[in-house]
Amino acid sequence: MDDVAWTRTEMLGPEAPPASAVGIVGWMRANLFSTWLNVILTVAALGAIWLLASHIVPFFAHSVWNASSYSECREIVARTWGEGASGACLAVIRERWKQFFFGFYPADYYWRPTLAFILMFVALAPVLFSSLPRKMLWFSAIFPGVAYWLLWGGSIFFPIAIYLGFVAGYVAFRVAERGPSFLPPLAAAVVTIVWWLFIAGPLANLLPDIGLPAVQSKQFGGFMLSMTIGVTGIAFSLPLGVLLALGRRSDMLFVKWISVGFIEFIRGVPLITLLLVASFLLNIFMPPGTNFDIILRVIIMVTLFAAAYMAEVIRGGLAALPRGQYEGADSLGLNYWQATRLVIMPQALKISIPGIVNTFIGLFKDTTLVAIIGLLDPVGLITSIRANSAWNGIVWELYGFVGFMFFICCFGMSRYSQYLERRLRTDRH
């Protein structure tokens, strides 16, 4: 018998993994059927999905797009699919889609909000994507005035006079820059407000009346109204929230108390209450004869409401920064505003991205509350449409369409925030 041990002289190559451990089968075994509890949960989830799909799929598969009333939709479904069949009456969307998107805006001027909507993406592109040329930011800066002129019409010189207020405020900031740290922003704010209140209007009236036919705010409605309030509120609540967050952390007691008082008051009052104040009470405190546009009042209240929550979100980002960042900015010889703009705030905003976008989404959805004060946003239009005898009784199709449109907008904001978080990550290897 040979007692010499046998030794392998070369290694075997790796074998392919078993078919049950890779691909879709392997993923299902690892995630859906790994334990008895997971098996039970998977089967229950599949049953729930099947139950929902068995009702939802036929509802849309039997949908009707051409009908003049809800009763006609039901007759078409019964005649085509049999008695007792259910189907979505999407004919109401086909008939009222212009009203959903433009409200009561004059049909001859639909091109104006459509152009403003397209230009909004052109203005947002260089803000959202840094790879685009920085020169495009000039259009981003002038877009609010262009959008106002397109939507409301009137003289082209009125938005120009408003922009001159920012120029006057910037000049005041630069002049007061050599003074105490609190003086430049205070001087800029005072000069800008004085310009808007006492100079912009008379200056615009002195210039020739060159522009577009005016459209009243009462003719706004639908998604155009929601986009106007939501986008404006988002654009102005972020910088205002930054100032409030900095004010709350300020060492100057007067500035700190004002910021704390404003934030705590706004956060303690429901938005509906502020909207009612904007609708019924704000004009009482204005000088006699003042015509304060209702949409402008709503935008101001929505912006202030969102800014208070934004301030706390950004304050959380500021609190998360280590003390060394502040000391490093001081060691470079930067003053307060330079350190805040170049070192502190970029890092705080990066930390606060999820909370900021969450506030933006909440603000955009809260625009539906304007129906309380008589503005016909998409939800308000549903009540108006259902009051028509032809569409009385229709529910799911209208609310489903409005919900779907809001979901697209909010989901887009959510996806962009995730993209921004990935792009700004500094812990990648």
Image (spheres, rainbow, N blue to C red):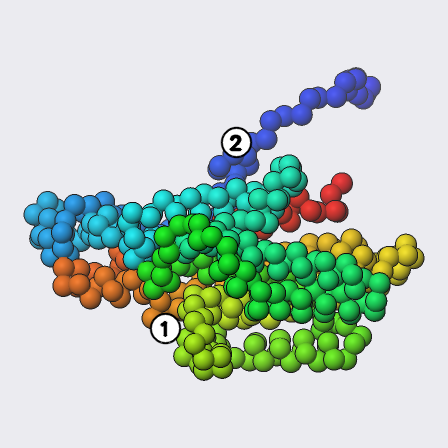
**Left or right relative to 244: residue 101:** left
Q: Which residue is mark 1?
A: 372
Q: CA distance from mark 1 to mark 2?
A: 60 Å
Q: Position of residue 305 (x, y in %)?
A: 54, 71
| Residue pictured at 60% horizontal, 71% vertical | 308
The secondary structure type at the circle numbered 2 is helix
**Which residue is more in the foreground, 176 or 416?**
176
Q: Is residue 293 above or below residue 118?
A: below
Q: Position of residue 425 (x, y in %)?
A: 70, 47
| Mark 2 Cα shell of 10 Å, populated few (<14), some (14-19), many (≥20) | few
Q: In the rendered structure, which amino acid carries the disc numbered 2?
A: Ala
Q: Position of residue 191 (x, y in %)?
A: 67, 66
The secondary structure type at the circle numbered 1 is helix
Look at discs 1 and 2 and give the one toward the viewer.
Answer: 1
Whether pointer 1 and pointer 2 mark residues with C-beta atoms closer than 8 Å, the reply is: no
**Left or right relative to 268: residue 94:** left
Q: Is residue 363 above or below residue 346?
A: below
| Residue pictured at 52% horizontal, 79% vertical | 269
| Residue pictured at 36% horizontal, 73% vertical | 372
Q: Position of residue 237 (x, y in %)?
A: 58, 63
| Residue pictured at 49% horizontal, 47% vertical | 120
